[in-house]
Amino acid sequence: MKHLQRPARRALLVVHVAVSVAWLGLSLGLLTLGITAYTTQDLSLTQAAYRAMKVFADWLLAPVALVTLVSGLVLSLGTPWGLARHRWVWIKFWITLATATATIFALRPGITHAAAAGVPDVSLVAAPIVSTTAYLFMTAISVLKPWGLTRRGRRLRLSATSRTRAPATSRKAVDVPRPGRTA
């Protein structure tokens, strides 16, 4: 994919950060409502909390999850970071894909069921705890960018640097020792 121009990249980055933060905030809101519904002795409060969770689930969860996933994917493919060049990007992609899938196919139906039943459900406390933890972890690795390049990233970097240098000898590329490998 061709790299994004700076204005497009910056606009997309703002969108990605905004929806990612929204997803984290939504998860914290769902956690608060889930804890309230599970711990209260007032059945009407439990039902009200689950109905409020259903409003968020029906209107916000899927769009926020999908926009986060798509904007992150386009950013990774349209910038030098790449999707599979750096471990932190690759891990973020898979965690985002897993949490988006779980949100759409497990959490939303669970909330719908709890709103209809109106009885306490511990899974609606556990799921937002897991998702909030995942989003905080992804935020941390986005800032810290740990772990370096993937195998593909090292290979791409090596081929890019070998193209920019003039060959010192006439050895074939097969004969050139690969860094980081021992016999």
Image (spheres, rainbow, N blue to C red):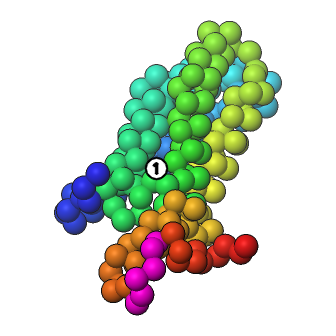
List x then y, in percent, for residue 84: 49, 55
Q: Is residue 140 above or below residue 58?
A: below
- 37 or 146: nearer the eye? 146
- 117 or 101: nearer the eye? 101
Type of amino acid at the residue the image marks with label 1 = Ser
Task: Please tell me which residue is depicted at 40% across the width and 83% down the height of the picture.
Answer: 170
Q: Is residue 92 above or below residue 102?
A: below
Q: Quadrant of residue 128?
A: top right
Write the start and end of the magenta stretch as one range: 168-173
Residue under numbered circle 1: 20
Q: Is residue 8 left or right of residue 46?
A: left
Q: Is residue 20 above or below residue 99?
A: below
Badge 1: how crowded within 10 Å, few (<14), some, or many (20+)?
many
Task: Please tell me which residue is depicted at 58% across the width and 77% down the height of the picture.
Answer: 177
List x then y, in percent, for residue 58: 46, 22
Q: Quadrant of the C terminus?
A: bottom right
Q: Is residue 119 left or right of residue 5?
A: right
List x then y, in percent, for residue 93: 52, 48
SS for tag 1?
helix
> In this orientation, does residue 48 appear?
no
Residue 169 lies within the magenta run: yes
- 22 or 77: nearer the eye? 77
